Image: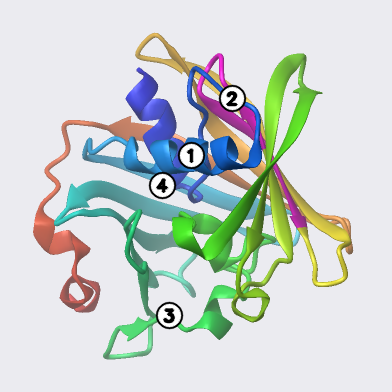
Amino acid sequence: MRKFTRGLTAAVLLMGIAASTAVADGDADARELVRKVLEALPKDSFEARMTVSSGHFEPRELRMVRRYVEGAHGTYLEVLSPNDLEGIRFLFLERSNEPNEQYIKVKASRTAIQVSEEVRRQPFLGSTFYVSDLVMPDLDDYSYKYLGKDVVEDRTVTLVEMTPKDPEKDIYSKTIVALDPSDMLVLRREYFDKDGQKIKVWTVDKLEQIRNTLSPTGQKMLDLRTGDASRLDVGKVDFEAEVTDAIFTPKYLLR
């Protein structure tokens, strides 16, 4: 199911950029490709289990819920284990043409706070993923450049460079995304620091047939500066779960 492929990639992670079936060359076409993908993200509701793991800490088990609500792609994340992190909750509300919103509720707090720019630059639950890596980009915040073709895991991909228009507001100086237009997959994202050095690489390393469609269910983020790597793996996905609008409000984080 192609919609599942796009939705799961965007949700987990947080969050990738898929490809269209017809990729045209040129910088304007690169931006248009991203715009179409963001607007085409599926509105299916589902619940899933997600694991964040690394060689440096005990795996984090999370509940993830997705729904399209009031013009926004909503993602709710709740840490289920280990015990010292249980109860940490995140809410991401992502829109293609409006500012995104992110909220967090930590275990000891009685309130949910809106995530600041500084928090977006922090590791997600101690992993090599940052909070900013898990959300969709705001389309108008970036300039786009077509970089040509490449081969990733024996697949021909299209490379698109995304550069923030306001460098002070972004943790990266640019991101290069490798898109597989044949299977509507994102296979790689490369992140660069303010000095133009490549510092992190995100890759899909597990693909599964789900509802007769090849879908990414495992991904890795490698920090080139330290050699550390973290994984995000999706387990059981339930499209029949009851998902209500109330879940995607800051108030729900306080329950």
Helix, strand or loop at disc 4?
helix
Upstream in sequence: badge 1 or badge 2: 2
Q: Amino acid at mark 4?
A: Ala
- Residue that badge 3 annotates: 115
Amino acid type of the residue that numbered disc 3 sits on in the rendered structure: Val
- Residue found at x 54% / y 74%: 120
Q: Which mark is residue 24?
A: 2
Q: What element does badge 2 sit on?
A: loop
Closer to the camera in the image, 4 or 140: 140
Left-right relation of 182 to 230: left
Q: Residue 89 at x, y = what percent?
A: 36, 69
- Disc number for residue 11: 4
The CA span between labels 1 and 4 is 21 Å
Distance between the alpha carbons at the discs numbered 1 and 3: 29 Å
Tell which tag, 1 or 4, sits nearer the viewer. 1
User: Magenta stretch mostly in which secondary structure?
Assistant: strand
- Please state if 22 lies on the left or on the right of 78 as rendered: right
Residue identified by numbered label 1: 32
| Other residues around mark 2 within 10 Å, as few (<14) / some (14–19) / many (≥20) | some
Asked whether the residues under the numbered discs 1 and 3 touch, taking CB atoms below 8 Å apart as contact, a structural biologist would say: no
Q: Quadrant of the N terminus?
A: top left
| Left or right, residue 208 beside residue 204 | left
